[in-house]
């Protein structure tokens, strides 16, 4: 008996331990469930009490509702068949629609579709290859909704933006992102190396988004989608998949170019009349450092000289925007209309001074000079001058024709001397590039080139598309 009584506590301990081992998981599960229930209840109550997410949703759906009626899908082609597609947006109640020049390049058939299903044929009013902007025209009808534009034109890094368009043919899509950079100059994004002062965003933009609007949180247009950077091509391209870096043409450039295309189909660009001495930096009297564009010389009687700009001045800001590179300065100035008053911040003799320049008209020869390399690569012909080392006097001669190029298909041959382009005389290399820049080459339209070959004149038809 004594041994039985002595072993009884051990038995109780064993039973208690077994009970705990069996019951503990169930108890712990109930405790965990109770904690989860409390968290869920609190979270749901918080969502019920604070409607910030619903207000954000409402704001975004309102932005989509206000923007989508002004967005269009473009079907572009030649003859009966559609060749490609892109996007655009309604500019005014007269039926003008804006898109990228590369979207409609070489087309003779453009169909504009609205989000409500309405579809209209469009005519091409004009294109500007150097800014990649084109204007179309459809018949005006009740219910055209032009997109409001940000008149201030002030875009800041970090602000939210929304890209609209038809990526991969998925019509009337919307994506969200932020402005991740300003004043970008991706070398390949602008097809003809023109006036680029792009907004960089991380909004998802893909093929088909080109020409679509980029909107701010107030439902105002701040830019137009134009290109993306990919993992394979970070210099900017109009093809490929989104890698989180896309580019848009600023609304200030659009507002300068589009009215001119509507008015007369041609563009006059702003002009400073100064020579670029490269990027330079100088120390300030306070021990700081400034960087900008060095003025190597100013054109006698030109806009800069009239305003008081001098050689050796350092231009550090144009219209309030820092100018660390000449391409950025050129894009801001060239994207503005002649006659515009542009404030320059200049560093001179240790001081910052303000100089207001009234822009002149950029000579066609200056524009053509900046596009010489692109013109030759697009045409597929390399030119030289004969008779003089001065391009203003040297006669243009074909020195090489690239295989399978537009020039080869047109029948250009080495040693051909260019007599005229599109019926306009080209007595010098400079005048030839000027006329090629103004011909249909950059817009994808046919034009003529007259050559002197073996003492005989011959006119060739050039089809850039």
Image (cartoon, rainbow, N blue to C red):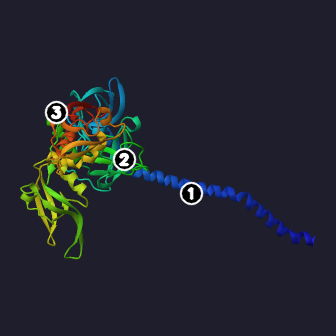
For label 3, the crowd category at 10 Å Cα-Cα, with few meaning under 14, some 14 to 19 and many 20 or more, is some
Q: CA distance from mark 3 to mark 2?
A: 38 Å
N-term-proximal mark, 3 vs 1: 1
| Residue 101 vertical position relative to residue 348 in the rendered view, above or below | above
Q: Where is the C terminus found, in terms of image quarters? A: top left
The answer, for residue 212, to whether it is visible in the render is no
Q: Where is the N terminus found, in terms of image quarters? A: bottom right
Q: Mark 3 or mark 2: which is in front?
A: 3
From the viewer's perspective, tell me whether residue 187 is left or right of residue 436. right
**Residue beneath label 2, please?**
228
Which residue is located at x 8 percent, y 55 percent? 302
Which residue occupies the foreground of this view, 136 or 326? 326
From the viewer's perspective, tell me whether residue 366 is left or right of residue 85. left
From the viewer's perspective, tell me whether residue 407 is left or right of residue 390. right
| Residue 327 vertical position relative to residue 439 in the rendered view, above or below | below
N-term-proximal mark, 1 vs 2: 1
The answer to whether marks 3 and 2 mark residues whose Cβ atoms lie closer than 8 Å is no
The image's mark for residue 35 is 1
The answer, for residue 38, to whether it is visible in the render is yes
Q: Mark 1 or mark 2: which is in front?
A: 2
The image's mark for residue 423 is 3
């Amino acid at each position: 008996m004594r041994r039985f009584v002595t072993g009884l506590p051990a038995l109780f301990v064993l039973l208690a331990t077994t009970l705990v081992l069996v019951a503990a998981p169930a108890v712990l599960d109930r405790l965990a469930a109770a904690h989860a229930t409390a968290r869920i209840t609190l979270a749901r109550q918080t969502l019920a009490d604070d409607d910030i997410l619903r207000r954000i949703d409402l704001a975004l759906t309102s932005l989509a509702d206000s923007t989508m009626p002004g967005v269009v899908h473009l079907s572009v082609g030649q003859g009966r068949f559609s060749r490609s597609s892109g996007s655009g947006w309604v500019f005014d109640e007269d039926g003008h629609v804006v898109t990228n020049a590369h979207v409609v390049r070489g087309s003779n058939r453009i169909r504009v579709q609205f989000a409500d299903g309405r579809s209209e044929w469009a005519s091409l009013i004009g294109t500007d290859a150097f800014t990649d902007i084109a204007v179309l025209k459809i018949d005006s009808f009740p219910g055209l909704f032009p997109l409001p534009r940000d008149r201030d034109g002030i875009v800041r890094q970090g602000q939210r933006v929304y890209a609209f368009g038809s990526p991969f043919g998925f019509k009337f899509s919307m994506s969200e992102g932020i402005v991740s950079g300003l004043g970008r100059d991706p070398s390949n994004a602008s097809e003809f190396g023109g006036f680029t002062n792009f907004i960089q965003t991380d909004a998802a933009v893909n093929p088909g988004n080109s020409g679509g609007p980029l909107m701010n949180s107030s439902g105002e247009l701040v830019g137009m989608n134009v290109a993306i950077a990919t993992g394979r091509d970070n210099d900017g391209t109009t093809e490929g998949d989104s890698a989180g870096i896309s580019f848009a043409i600023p609304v200030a450039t659009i507002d300068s170019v589009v009215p001119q295309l509507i008015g007369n189909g041609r563009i006059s660009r702003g002009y400073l009349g100064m020579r670029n001495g490269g990027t330079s930096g100088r120390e300030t009297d306070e021990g700081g450092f400034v960087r900008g564009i060095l003025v190597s010389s100013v054109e006698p009687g030109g806009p800069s000289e009239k305003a008081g700009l001098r050689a050796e001045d350092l231009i550090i800001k144009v219209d309030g925007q820092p100018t660390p590179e000449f391409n950025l300065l050129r894009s801001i100035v060239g994207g503005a209309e002649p006659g515009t008053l542009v404030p320059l911040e200049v560093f001179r003799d240790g001081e910052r001074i303000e100089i207001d320049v009234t822009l002149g008209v950029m000579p066609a020869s200056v524009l053509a000079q900046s596009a010489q390399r692109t013109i030759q690569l697009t045409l597929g012909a390399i030119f030289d001058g004969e008779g003089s080392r001065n391009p203003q006097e040297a006669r243009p001669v074909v020195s090489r024709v690239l295989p399978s190029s537009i020039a080869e298909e047109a029948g250009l041959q080495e040693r051909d001397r260019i007599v005229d382009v599109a019926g306009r005389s080209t007595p010098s290399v400079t005048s030839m590039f000027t006329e090629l820049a103004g011909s249909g080459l950059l817009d994808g339209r046919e034009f003529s080139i007259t050559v002197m070959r073996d003492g005989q004149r011959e006119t060739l038809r050039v089809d850039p598309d």
